[in-house]
Amino acid sequence: MSAIEPGTDDWQRLSTRMLLVHPVQELLRAWPVLLGLVFAGTAGGHGSWWSLVATVVVILGGLLRWFTTTYRITPEQVQVRKGLLRRQVLTVPRDRIRTVDVTAHALHRSLGLAKVEVGTGRTDRKSDGVKLDALNAAEAARLHEELMHRVSAPAAGAAERPRETILASMRPDWVRYGPFTLTGFVTVGVIAGVVWRSLNEAHVDPRRIGMLRALLDRFDRTPLAVDVLVVVAVLLVVVAVASTLGYVLAFHGFRLTRNDAGTLHVTRGLVTTRAITIEERRLRGVEFSEPLLLRAVGGARCIAITTGLRVGRGAERGGSVLLPPAPRAEALRVAGEVLRDGVPFTGTLAGHGPRATRRRFSRAIGAVLVVVAAALALWGLGVVPAWTWQAALVVVPFAALLAADRAHALGHAVLNGTVVGRRGSLVRRRSVLSCEGIIGWNLRRSFFQRRSGLATLVATTAAGRQRVEVQDVPLEQALRTAEEALPGLLTPFLEG
């Protein structure tokens, strides 16, 4: 992306209907500030005036975005001009476009609008590409087709459009996997934080609210153990409902297709719809993911390892989801279909041996025993009660089970031109990375790994999380794996 001085011809404005969108978006972003101004000004008797002035300023800022933003699409570039005091002209060469992400939340859809994000695949930059918020939905779809398939809308008739093959589509029974994701915990935590902050800003004591006061009085009359069980049960129900709702909102209408133009296309969303296109020539692999709760009910999901999609935002927000939580067999099938080879996901992996197993147990149980020793010492000094070290001691068997599961998960192989690494317990990942996508090796050995003859082999890549790790593998196996995947790459760095 670079700054240029293009001519002034052919520049277009965003849809005028965005004048109803951006002020609302800006007000939603600024609500903590507006709320603070209300209560800050209440002491002086001018709270309403302060909030009114701030609201007008925020709305004007949203309106100015339409007057100061223009764009144009040339045969070589996508160009966007924006800003009033700080004028910017941003461009993306069309031959560097890697993703065109089309999203539309509820307000967008009610007005027939959509947001288009054009990315270049530089996942290390937050300002990658350009955004057009908002265009007419039909114009957004046409722009997506033109930029990703390298065709112009007038020239591409219905018969010339790439033929699509459906790889996966949402099934109603998949909703049963919704409660076993962790999105509910995040949602409940965010809502609780917002409510608590609002009550705190308003100087409202929750104990003065009639319903809450009656509930707290009831808890005072029941045993503590009963109170804990009730709170846990209610929390589990709320989290399960929130997780299911989040699953439906994010993945309703999910559809994964492949077309003859060499792209994968994902569409999903209920209130906010999203369309993501992935060029297969940029696809470097697939991650087969099994979080603990999802694995317990036979579920899994697939995530693309590809250049052009941002990392660090989560798979759902970053757009790399190839399949939402679904039956494990379906996830295996889709992963094989995407890579056109199912062997890396079903083939036998080499274990890492007893030394890696001992390291897993020593790390898990050793950490708990340190906590137990610290609690015993504090109890001996009279700082904490006796139940603290006793509770810590109870965790030891669970730590042992976790260590056994993590040791069982370790495995690696080179299968059909891919490097396969499996690890993890809370989130078990089987990462399949094409050998052609490896740009280097990183061999890490901590002090304790050197004493055990182990190493962590890291295949670096420009896609996804930018690495695939083979953890706690015997050193000789790590070197053989690297040599088999990319012969000769490590040879100059080896002794003897």
Image (cartoon, rainbow, N blue to C red):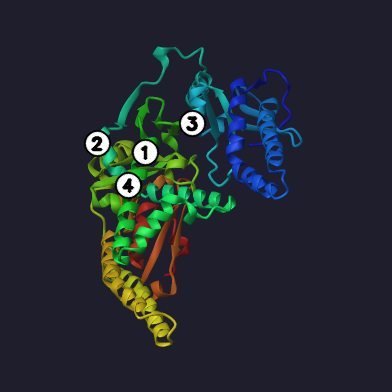
| Position of residue 256 measured from the top left corner of the image (x, y, whole percent) | 35, 31
Closest to the observer, 347 or 22 = 22
Mark 1, residue position = 322
Is disc 1 placed on a helix, strand or loop? strand
Query: Nearer the N terminus, badge 3 or badge 2?
Result: 3
Residue at 43% x, 75% y is 447
Closest to the observer, 371 or 149 = 371
Of circles 3 and 4, the one toward us is: 4
Q: Cβ–Cβ below 8 Å for labels 1 and 2?
A: no
Q: Is residue 229 visible?
A: yes
Q: Is residue 413 visible?
A: no
Residue at 50% x, 49% y is 195
Is disc 4 placed on a helix, strand or loop? helix
Mark 1–mark 2 Cα distance, whole angstroms, equals 18 Å
Tell me: 130 left or right of 385.
Answer: right
Residue at the bottom extreme of this rendering: 380
When asked about the image quadrant of residue 495, the answer is bottom left
Query: Nearer the N terminus, badge 1 or badge 2?
Result: 2
Q: Which mark is residue 240?
A: 4
| Position of residue 90 measured from the top left corner of the image (x, y, whole percent) | 66, 33
Q: Amino acid at mark 1?
A: Leu
Mark 3–mark 1 Cα distance, whole angstroms, equals 21 Å
Mark 3–mark 4 Cα distance, whole angstroms, equals 24 Å
Mark 3, residue position = 105
Q: Which mark is residue 173?
A: 2
Residue at 65% x, 48% y is 39
Query: Nearer the N terminus, badge 2 or badge 4?
Result: 2
Q: Is residue 318 above or below residue 59?
A: below
Q: Amino acid at mark 3?
A: His
Badge 1: residue crowd in 10 Å (few <14, some 14–19, many ≥20):
many
Q: Amino acid at mark 4?
A: Ala
Mark 2–mark 4 Cα distance, whole angstroms, equals 16 Å
